[in-house]
Amino acid sequence: MSCDVKCSPSHTRMEIEEEIKLIESAQIVNFSTINSDGFPNMRPMANLRNPTSNPHLVEIFEGERNRFSTYLTTYKGSQKVKDIENNNKVSLFFIDMKTGGALTVFGTVEMVEDDDFKKRLWNDEWKRSYPAGADDPNYGVLRFTAEKVRSSFHGKSNVHAV
């Protein structure tokens, strides 16, 4: 993916680690799709990359080659799924309210069809939304593949490809 603003060729490993730390510390991620009228549609979602909230997923994310990619759960009949069917380009927004650090990750999303993988992600706390558990016909999992990152830390902004 090409950057729509100048990409930083000097993005350091330390800056990338700071971005990953923000992703892993956030409880909530704001997930944006584009609706059928062409407008952004943002909603807060549980951040499955947070190891405190989701210790059972640490191993899955450690195996990810793209450290900015993630998974999200969704109701299969939701507006976000309809938006994704029309345009699978999305963004995730993370913020640290204490420091003001912010991160937007741009990429694409697709529905995961692998039932065994969906069961590995399953958390019993989700039964309030999906009463039949991991086999609930409404339980969906989205795989987000990151392509570009825009970050702002300590008054410095960066854009880089993943």
Image (spheres, rainbow, N blue to C red):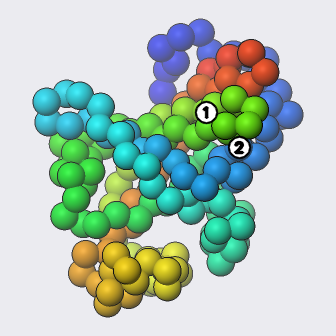
Q: Is residue 58 above or below residue 99?
A: below
> What residue would you read off at disc 1?
103
The residue labelled by disc 2 is: 22
Residue at 43% in and 49% down? 44
Name the residue rendered at 52%, 76% in the picture.
121
Is disc 2 placed on a helix, strand or loop? helix
**Image point (37%, 46%), residue name:** 43
Residue 4 makes an appearance in the image: yes
Residue projecting furthest to the right? 14
Q: Residue at x 52, y 48 (%)?
A: 29
Contact (Cβ within 8 Å) of mark 2 with mark 1: yes
Q: Residue furthest front?
A: 98
Q: Amino acid at mark 2?
A: Leu
Residue 161 visible in image:
no
- Residue density around tag 1, few if under 14, some if 14–19, many if 20 or more, within 10 Å: many
* Three-letter amino acid code at the position of disc 1: Leu
Where residue 112 sits in the image (x, y, percent)? 37, 66
